[in-house]
Amino acid sequence: MTIERTAEVQRRSRSRYRVGPDSLRALRDHLDPQSLRVPILADPRAWDLHGSAVAAALEPLRPEVLFLAGEGEKRFAAVERLTTELAERRVHRREVLVIFGGGVCCDVGGLVAMLYMRGMRYVIVATTLMAQIDAAIGGKVGCNTPGRKNLLGGFHHPELVLIDPGFLGTLPERHLRAALAEALKMHVLLPALAIKPLLEPAGNRDQFALEQLAERCLDGKLALLEKDPFEADLRRSLNLGHAVAHALEAEPGSTLLHGEAVAIGLAATARYAEMSGISTPGRAESIIDQLKRLRLPDRTEQETEGLASRLEAIADHRGGEIHLVVPAGDEGVEIVEDCDFGLLARCASGVPVAL
């Protein structure tokens, strides 16, 4: 690792993340008091709901708002549009870009900040549960290209991430529950974090549970990223459930939310591990039962042959194989180097846990 990259790893610390209320006050305190305006890249729905509060909190600074709407705009055309708008508004690289929204805003906004004028500072105000427990953490930025998720991107850490569960009161139920799949994934990876008791209260919007869930998922993800923050090794436990999820999302016309695809991926890998003798009997049932209690899907109706083909395509993109992360033993995970894509696809369709 180069000196520059080592220094960046050392700078990335828990202190850049703040969990709790009063995020807008913290945002105002963080911004340069001599600034005349604040460039903001916002999700339109989040801005409609909370924009007036943001503007009031930032006074006398003037918000200069650009919008990014949903997964359909997670593409390079949006990056080009946004960088052009920043230039037209004469935003300088010394200004701080504020990202206000969910996972797509975090990914694309971070990429814009990385590329604009060779890089500008940015801050994230995460307004969805998926952003608060996953997308805003770790500095990964990127966008999709036709047929490929996150093909373009890099690592560009925000200087501050504000995680305020208060924003989740207006989050649609389906989006809240989909994000719980990422929290369940973290429980499977690091049971010592004691995430499991928080899942159902968080799904019922208990504010204390949501705040504790954000704290523990943050600590867990940072711990797992510590030794390999730049993904030099693709055999990463954080990919649990994601090989299947990406294959499901790649089906033309798929309407799955990312968390819903991850939920199916968790169930699929749990079945695969138990059928392969990697996990103890009953562990798959335990994970699937938890998904059902959270009202998340545990199987897909997608045709298994097509799903297997898409899994093979993902393997081709990764040098010929998928390092499949699966639940192992009674707890923790194991990485399978030689994956049976046909079996994995059948497991995603809900094949019984039996040989």
Image (spheres, rainbow, N blue to C red):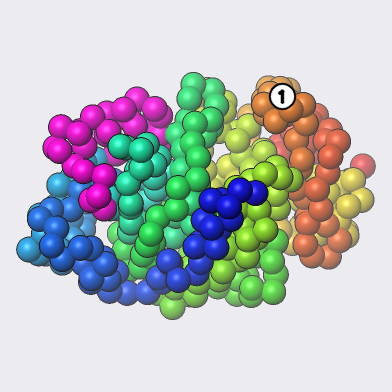
Residue under the image location 32 percent in, 46 percent down: 120
Within the image, what quadrant is residue 347 found in?
top right
Task: Tell me if mark 1 has few (under 14), some (14-19) or many (20+) residues whose alpha carbon lies within 10 angstroms of its own.
Answer: few
Q: Locate residue 22 relative to residue 332 in the image: left or right.
A: left
- Camera sees residue 343: no
Residue 87: give x, y in percent of width and height. 20, 34
Q: Residue furthest bottom?
A: 208
Front-most of 52 and 6? 6
- Camera sees residue 141: yes
Residue under the image location 23 percent in, 63 percent down: 31
Residue holding disc 1: 316
Q: Which residue type does callout 1 highlight?
A: Asp
Q: What are the residue bounds of the magenta stretch?
A: 68-96
Numbered disc 1: secondary structure = helix
Residue 326: give x, y in percent of width and height. 77, 50
Residue under the image location 71 percent in, 39 percent down: 348
Front-most of 25 and 89? 89
